[in-house]
Image: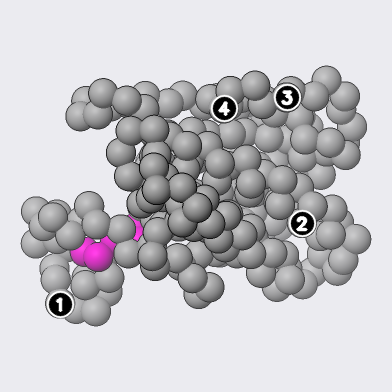
Amino acid sequence: MPSSTATVINPATARKPRDEEVDVYGLTHPGRVRQDNQDHFVICALQKQVVVLNTSLPEPGVLKESSERLAFLAMVADGVGGGLKGEEASRLALESVTRYVTDSVRTFQTSDPSDDTAFLERLQEAALHSHEDLRRRSMDDPDRAGMATTLTLWIGIWPRGYLLQVGDSRCYLLRRGVLTQVSRDQTMAQDLIDAGVLTRANAENSRLSHMLSSSIGGGRARRS
């Protein structure tokens, strides 16, 4: 199920950073276990048009035109299902959500910025839209059966920041040298910890810690 949260920076004590003051970088690696890489990421400045700043997606269509930044978007997806199925699932999810969120930001700019309930719902709808798209592809093509992906999305629309997560790709905050996890793992183990069935120490050694309770394209993604 999509999980979303919002934070607010006090605009009286801070100002909106200019584009040249924001440093961003992305890197993806297959890790030490898999031979293939099933991860994708995308970092965007959402303006009148999307300007892709950094991504592992092939041929993202980088746009040269720019204008005042409306929002800043960063996403990562980790494919589930093995091999090309996982790689395709994470790629399709990011492409789909990017298009959907772009339209949502335009809607946010013309609505009441003090009430972000509708925007949070649109973020969840973006995840569910991508989920339904992957499910259709999986049902239409046996070779794609079982493909799914995690999705972690952060979007900043000054002075607010929004985090949406499906799965267990973690989001951390690094501040003054301290790394803090701000997302919640959507795994079977974490669900049992929350229910008081497992302790965190026991969960770390459990195979349930690697079993997703929610994913894009999987059987458990639904509106929270």
Secondary element under disc 1, as helix, strand or loop, is loop
Q: As rendered, which of 186 and 216 lies closer to the eye?
A: 216
Amino acid tagged 4: Leu
Identify the disc placed on residue 61: 3
| Numbered disc in front, either 1 or 2 | 2
What residue is disc 2 on?
104
Residue 209 appears in which quarter of the rendering?
Answer: bottom left
What residue is disc 1 on?
197
Type of secondary structure dominating the magenta stretch = loop
| Numbered disc in front, either 3 or 2 | 3
Q: Which residues are magenta?
A: 185-189
- Report if residue 148 lies within the magenta region: no
Amino acid tagged 2: Ser
| Percent x, y of residue 204 | 14, 54
User: Which sits earlier in the primary sequence, circle 3 or circle 2?
Assistant: 3
Residues at circles 3 and 4 in contact by the CB criterion of under 8 Å: no
Identify the disc placed on residue 54: none
Residues at circles 1 and 3 in contact by the CB criterion of under 8 Å: no
Q: Residues within 10 Å of mark 1 (few under 14, many from 20)?
A: few
Q: Residue at x 87, y 24 (%)?
A: 65
Quote the CA–CA distance across marks 1 and 2. Answer: 39 Å
Q: Residues within 10 Å of mark 2 (few under 14, many from 20)?
A: some
User: Which sits earlier in the primary sequence, circle 1 or circle 3?
Assistant: 3
Quote the CA–CA distance across marks 1 and 3. Answer: 48 Å
Q: As rendered, which of 7 and 36 lies closer to the eye?
A: 36
| Percent x, y of residue 188 | 25, 65
Amino acid tagged 1: Val
Residue 73 appears in which quarter of the rendering?
Answer: top right
